[in-house]
Image (cartoon, grey):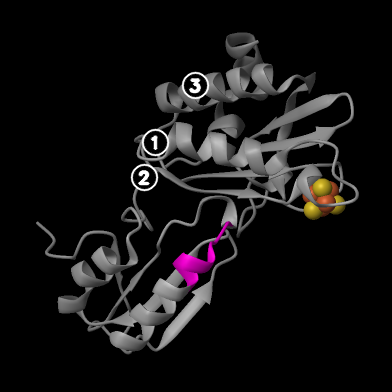
Amino acid sequence: MSDKPDGSILQRDKETYAIVPRTPAGMLTPEFLEQLAAVVRKYDIPITKITSGHRLALVGLKKDDIAKVWDELGTDVGRASELCLHYVQACPGNSVCSLGVQDSLGMGLELEKRYVGVDMPAKLKVGVSGCPMTCSEGYVRDIGLIGKRSGWIVAYGGNSGGRPRIGDVVAEELSTEDAIALVDKLVEYYRQNGKKRERVARMVDRLGIEAVKETVL
Ligand code: SF4
């Protein structure tokens, strides 16, 4: 059994660790930023980085400091490499962006709340955008939501990385409630049909988007 501290990733030096505190939808408060700065200084953490998925990475921690850092940050232990929801990206949407037509921040926070801590066949990434500009990259995320004036588009099976895939549009013009209900079904479909370590994109390649639609619509 691994003696890797909870929520940590051993770095290539085989001595120090990284952790990835959860920052739902990339939202940060002054209080958290002050606490973060205090912790980074106190434990002399050499690298503090914002990741591509709205998460924070604290890199170069000593093993004995990890539990104390989690405690002092006051966040839930972030799951960095486990088979579960890794993050929900969400753009500012209609709360501040002049182009926004849907509440992507509210939707992103709701989806994060629903799926955080739920076991998945592999990691799951979600992108929620408040208009068709799609700044949160939902077409290349396992699940993508794109806001239009007429409602939400829900895309499924996107992936970036080494084998990119554009997600298939499963439904359009959905109300917020209907979009959440559909995402619930798509997550459950993945939990039932995905093989261990198979991303949604590869599952859709294997089973076909029509089979998915027949089940969830
Ligand atoms: S996707 Fe649209 S609403 Fe969101 S940040 Fe980009 S332009 Fe603004």
Marks 3/1 in contact by CB < 8 Å: the verdict is: no
Task: Tell me: 6 left or right of 146.
Answer: left
Q: Earlier in the sequence, mark 3 or mark 2?
A: 2
Residue farthest toward the front in the current orientation of the protein: 31
Is label 3 in a helix, a strand or a loop?
A: helix
Q: Looking at the picture, tell me which residue is in the foreground, 120 or 5.
A: 5
CA neighbours of label 2 inside 10 A, class few (<14), some (14 to 19), many (20+): some
- Report which residue position mark 3 lands on: 189
Q: Earlier in the sequence, mark 3 or mark 1?
A: 1
- Report which residue position mark 1 lands on: 120
CA neighbours of label 1 inside 10 A, class few (<14), some (14 to 19), many (20+): many
Q: Is residue 90 above or below residue 16?
A: above
Residue appearing at x 73%, y 51% in the figure: 92
Residue appearing at x 67%, y 16% in the figure: 178
Residue appearing at x 15%, y 77% in the figure: 64
Marks 1/2 in contact by CB < 8 Å: the verdict is: yes
**Inter-mark Cα distance, 3 to 1:** 10 Å
Which region is colored magenta?
27-33
Q: Looking at the picture, tell me which residue is in the foreground, 31 or 193.
A: 31
Q: Is residue 46 above or below residue 131?
A: below
Does label 3 point to a residue whose CB lies under 8 Å from ligand 1?
A: no
**Inter-mark Cα distance, 3 to 2:** 16 Å
* Residue 204 horizontal/vertical position (percent): 59, 30
Q: What's the residue type where badge 3 is placed?
A: Tyr
Q: Earlier in the sequence, mark 1 or mark 2?
A: 2
Q: What's the residue type where badge 1 is placed?
A: Met
Q: What's the residue type where badge 2 is placed?
A: Leu
The image quarter containing residue 108 is: top right
The image quarter containing residue 192 is: top left
Residue 83: assigned label: 2
